[in-house]
């Protein structure tokens, strides 16, 4: 039962362009959505989150968009930098719950 | 240190051995989580503590898995009689507080322990 899905295993983008990472979910009880970035041999690092009552949250080069009717969220990185190359995980928290449910991740490669 | 630390970073165990994995959360963080990450997958929830109380252990895959946090700080995940399918990265995360319907939802992860069962 995959409640959070990242359907693109990998994405390759030119430096300076926009990176768009997508995530779909099935459970309407999720109340927070989070994006994590992971480098090899390190733990996931929190990037940005959005509450289910919002449709957009921005932090510097990172913007997360939430479309509740489509049960879809996306992470935009503008402009993309080579240091952004990592695995990006989408995660969701169930309302009144504590654990995070993660997608399988998308490998982002930013070419210089 | 300021972050979550885990030890050992790598552990090789023979099938049938018991292992103990340690997590030191960020000082002052009330909530502590354990996740298991298989190769090519996202982390999967194992168990959750609020202070010393284990409030959710629904993700523990079998009774061979046991976690404790006796003083509400350091936590240990113990796996008895390890099997090959236990090979994975075990991640610990901590959070300042988790209040339903409010903030505090960000979890901060340690580097993980890579367990290989041969």
Image (cartoon, rainbow, N blue to C red):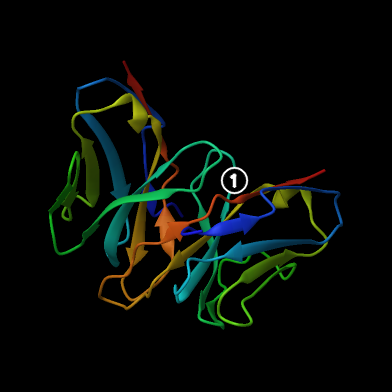
The answer to whether any part of residue A107 appears in the image is no
Using residue A91 as the reference point, say whether residue B24 is left or right of it.
Answer: right
| Horizontal side of residue A108 vs B88, given as left or right | left
- The local crowd at label 1, few if under 14, some if 14 to 19, many if 20 or more residues have their Cα within 10 Å, is some
Q: Looking at the picture, how far across and down is residue A66, in whole percent?
A: 18, 51
- The quadrant in which residue A106 appears is top left
Tag 1's secondary structure? loop
Q: Residue at the spot x=45%, y=77% of the render?
A: B30
Is residue A9 visible from the viewing direction of this image? yes
Give the labeled residue for mark 1. B38
Q: The numbered mark 1 sits on a residue in which chain? A: B
Vertical relation: A42 (above or below) A82 = below
Q: Residue at x 18, y 56 (%)?
A: A68
Between B96 and B84, the one lying in front of the other is B96
Using the image as rendered, state which of residue B61 and residue B100 is in the foreground.
B100
Residue B87 placement (x, y as % from top left): 70, 47
Quadrant for residue A111, please give it.
top left
Could you tell me residue B7's position as x and y percent?
A: 66, 56
In the rendered image, the quadrant that contains the C terminus of chain B is: top right
């Amino acid at each position: 039962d995959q409640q959070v899905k990242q359907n693109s295993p990998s994405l390759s983008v030119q430096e300076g362009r926009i990176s768009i990472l997508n995530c779909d979910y099935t459970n309407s009880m999720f109340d927070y959505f989070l994006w994590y970035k992971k480098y090899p041999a390190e733990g996931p690092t929190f990037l940005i989150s959005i509450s289910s009552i919002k449709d957009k949250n921005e932090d510097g080069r990172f913007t997360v968009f939430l479309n509740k009717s489509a049960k879809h969220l996306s992470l935009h990185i503008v402009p993309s930098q080579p240091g952004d190359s990592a695995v990006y995980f989408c995660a969701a928290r169930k309302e009144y719950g504590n654990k995070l449910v993660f997608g399988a991740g998308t490998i982002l490669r930013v070419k210089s | 240190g300021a972050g979550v630390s885990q030890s050992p970073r790598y552990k090789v165990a023979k099938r049938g051995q018991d292992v103990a994995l340690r997590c030191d959360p960020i000082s002052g963080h009330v909530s502590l989580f354990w996740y298991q990450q298989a190769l090519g997958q996202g982390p999967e929830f194992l168990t959750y503590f609020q202070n010393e109380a284990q409030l959710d252990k629904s993700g523990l895959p079998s009774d061979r898995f046991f976690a404790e946090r006796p003083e509400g700080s350091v936590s240990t995940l113990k796996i008895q009689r390890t099997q090959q399918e236990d090979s994975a990265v075990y991640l610990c995360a901590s959070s300042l507080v988790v209040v339903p319907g409010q903030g505090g939802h960000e979890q901060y992860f340690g580097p993980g322990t890579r367990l290989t069962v041969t």
